[in-house]
Amino acid sequence: MDMHVRYWDTDKVVTRYYGSAFLGHATAQDMHQKLCENCHFDGKSVVQISMDDPNVNWALFKLLSEDLQKASEKKFVDIGSCGLHTMHNAFRAGLASTGWELCHFFSSLS
């Protein structure tokens, strides 16, 4: 399991590698334990968890959500199991709604 931290710094979003935990075939409970052991930061400042394996990671998301609820009355931003697809679809819908035919423009740049 690779851990990355993404945060806002002055005028841009920065992503930093935080660490790795070698787990093999792990359960959500195993991942939760390793994540808590390896990430020594205030969980109250975590906004969103990204994931790439929906089945195990939804269970991990639930465990971390419960931790956050206990520590504070906040909730994570839930953008689904794959943030990239969610953001891509939102961008595509916004692009289509403009009627500017930007796809043709961007294609012509290559």
Image: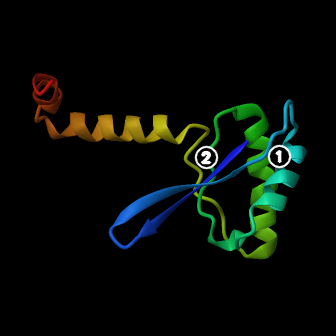
* Kind of residue at disc 2: Ser
Counting other residues with Cα less than 10 Å from the Cα at mark 1, is it few (<14), some (14-19), or many (20 or more)?
many
Question: Going 45% across and 59% down the picture, which residue do you hit?
Answer: 14
Look at the image and tell me in which quarter the C terminus lies: top left
> Judging from the image, what secondary structure is the residue with disc 1 in?
helix
Left or right relative to 56: residue 76: left
Q: Position of residue 103 (x, y in %)?
A: 18, 27
Q: Position of residue 30 (x, y in %)?
A: 89, 45
Choose between 44 and 35: the one closer to the eye: 35
Left or right relative to 97: residue 109: left
Sequence-earlier tag: 1 or 2: 1
Choose between 79 and 26: the one closer to the eye: 26
The quarter of the picture where residue 53 lies is top right
Choose between 6 and 102: the one closer to the eye: 6
Do callouts 1 and 2 mark residues in contact (Cβ within 8 Å)? no
Question: Going 83% across and 46% down the picture, which residue do you hit?
Answer: 31
Q: Position of residue 1 (x, y in %)?
A: 73, 42
Q: Which residue is mark 1?
A: 31
Q: Which residue is mark 2?
A: 50
Question: Going 13% across and 35% down the picture, which residue do you hit?
Answer: 99
Q: CA distance from mark 1 to mark 2?
A: 13 Å
Choose between 102 and 31: the one closer to the eye: 31
Left or right relative to 57: residue 90: left
